[in-house]
Amino acid sequence: MTLRIAIVGHIRHPIAPPFKGGMEAFTHSLARMLAERGHDVTLLACGDSATGLPPGVKLLPICETHYDARYPWHEFHGTDASVKEQAESFGEIAADHGSLAFTFTTKPEERSKLWAARHDAYWASLALRKGAKGISTDCCVPVSRLAECVTRAQEKAGALGLIAPVVGHVGDGNFHTLPLIMMDDPDEVARAQEFVSWLNDLAISMDGTCTGEHGIGQGKARYLLPELGEGAVSMMVAVKHGIDPLNLFNSGDRKSVV
């Protein structure tokens, strides 16, 4: 018998960081007992989390393969035959680029299960750093610049010492980074603000937008002029004044725009 014990935490993530202390000690004791009885035991663990292995127990690191893997979800539209053809073609292309697995279904209940991982991405990201707050960005760039923008965003986050998972519905060039910030750390908050500002400017420089779907709001008002130009913003102000001559709606916000 071959027994593989995965040291994972009880959080909503495909592969989770391991428990420390008691859980790891328990797992080692169980592995030792099974190995002494002649079983082939392999521990699946992240990095050096399984140090001091019992004799006869092997270690298979998983972070280098699964934990850092990318999980793209795709929806195909058309007739039953065309959807099947598209999905099969995508699976072949994914395999050519080192895909670990490809799952395809047309059944609503099975589709819901597949999409659950995407819908839970926010909570899975928060689990990467207990106590942190996620600060979501909303940039969108032309698809031709998407790979470059995401890559540079990841590099910038790393240079600033930030943990910033990326999720996106990238068919339209829109993606979200989620810096995980300890809000009681002023230096970390400042680095997060620097990152968000830098990323907004980067997207605009690539003929994109600082907000792909969630709107400008007060926080991004200062990016309107660089993104749209004075002419477009002046037209918006004129329309606003036309329907709100007494400036009752969001009174005072204009100062942050022009």
Image (cartoon, helix red, strand yellow):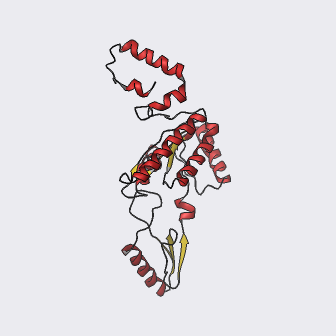
Image position of 48 (left or right of 241): right
* Nearer the observer, 38 or 217: 217
Spot occupied by residue 157 in the image (x, y as percentages of width and height):
53, 51
Image position of 228 (left or right of 216): right
Spot occupied by residue 4 in the image (x, y as percentages of width and height):
49, 73
Number of marks in the image?
A: 0
* Nearer the observer, 51 or 16: 51
49, above or below 200, in the image: below
252, above or below 242, in the image: below
Spot occupied by residue 192 in the image (x, y as percentages of width and height):
46, 48
20, above or below 31, in the image: above
Image position of 159 (left or right of 130): right
Q: Is residue 116 visible?
A: no
Among the 4 quarters of the image, the one containing residue 208: top right
Spot occupied by residue 52 in the image (x, y as percentages of width and height):
49, 81
Q: Residue at x 61, y 37 (%)?
A: 143
Q: Is residue 156 visible?
A: yes
Q: Residue at x 58, y 45 (%)?
A: 150
Q: Residue at x 42, y 35 (%)?
A: 219
Q: In the displayed orientation, state which residue is furthest to the right.
A: 96
